[in-house]
Amino acid sequence: MQSWTRRKFLVATPGLLALGPLIPSTFGATSHTVRRGDTLSEIAVRYGTTVNDIKRSNGLKSDLIKVGQKLNIPQTEAELDTFKKEFSKYRINRSKWKYIVTHHSAIKNGNAKIYDKNHRRRGMQNGLAYHFVIGNGIDSGDGQIEIGSRWKNQLDGGHVRSSHVNQHGVGICLIGNFQETRPTTKQIASFSALVDLIGNYHLGGNFKYTAHKEVDKNHTVCPGRYFPLKSMHERFG
Ligand SMILES: [Zn+2]
């Protein structure tokens, strides 16, 4: 298993070198070209920012936007410095990942370490079932992205029923119960930036953006009714 993984990494290396840094300097900042039906508040949800920040960053005096107008989406202010340093340490097996799957933790407390312990107790020998965990400010920073050992070692996830999707899906869990409360703006900013980084930058857009309840139909409400799934599909397809 180890040698197979190593070989895959070596094959992937030339592509990585051609791609440039593992985290582009634009991480967390982007631009958006206004489409028919877009509103500033909907765009703010999609990128995890606020209407005021978009207006300030584009010098807008009113909420009026025009189709075709290019808006600067300001960089997220979430605690991403540690993430950036850590993420760059690990190679990515780009041929493995085909899905990015959204989850909520369904409880308001926790962080990667706590969930890792729980998952091991439940018999998962690789621990934390997700590849990434995004904090809500209770047991880790608000918007902090923690990297799980399954991402560090490019291992299958254990976050859905489908073994195909566990094998090829990057599992991202936002902490919180989004049947009851909304994710924080910083959580969404980090989430949206992370999907963009992995899916668009590293996988070149060759991925399917999805959520747990769309994979395991009729078995779960995850990531909850208050997760802005429609907005994320607007952004990532
Ligand atoms: Zn889930």
Image: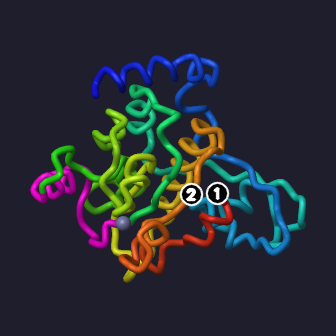
Give the residue pinned by disc 2. 209
Residue 61 occupies which quadrant of the picture? bottom right
Question: Which comes sooner in the sequence, label 1 or label 2?
Answer: 2
Start-end of magenta stretch: 104-122
Check residue 18 for magenta coloring: no
Which amino acid type is marked by label 1? Phe
Above or below — where is 11 with respect to 153?
Answer: above
Quadrant of the snapshot with the N terminus:
top left
- The reply, left or right, for residue 196 in relation to residue 191 is right
Above or below — where is 85 with respect to 65?
Answer: above
Work out whether residue 90 or residue 23 is closer to the camera in this orientation and state it: 90
Quadrant of the snapshot with the C terminus:
bottom right
Q: Are marks 1 and 2 in contact (CB under 8 Å)?
A: yes
Give the residue pinned by disc 1. 236
Q: How many numbered discs sit on the rendered protein?
A: 2
Residue 47 occupies which quadrant of the picture? bottom right
- The reply, left or right, for residue 71 in relation to residue 194 is right
**Image spot of residue 119 (x, y percent):** 18, 56
**Image spot of residue 133 (x, y percent):** 35, 53
* Mark 2 neighbour density, 10 Å: few (under 14) some (14–19) many (20 or more): many
Mark 2 CB near ligand 1 (8 Å cut):
no
Ligand 1 positioned in quadrant? bottom left
Above or below — where is 175 with respect to 87?
Answer: below
**Image spot of residue 214 (x, y percent):** 49, 70
* Mark 1 neighbour density, 10 Å: few (under 14) some (14–19) many (20 or more): some
Above or below — where is 118 with respect to 219?
Answer: above
**Image spot of residue 204 (x, y percent):** 65, 39
CA gap, disc 1 and disc 2: 6 Å
Report the residue at 64% width, 46% height from top: 29
Report the residue at 48% width, 59% height from top: 186
- The reply, left or right, for residue 85 in relation to residue 68 is left
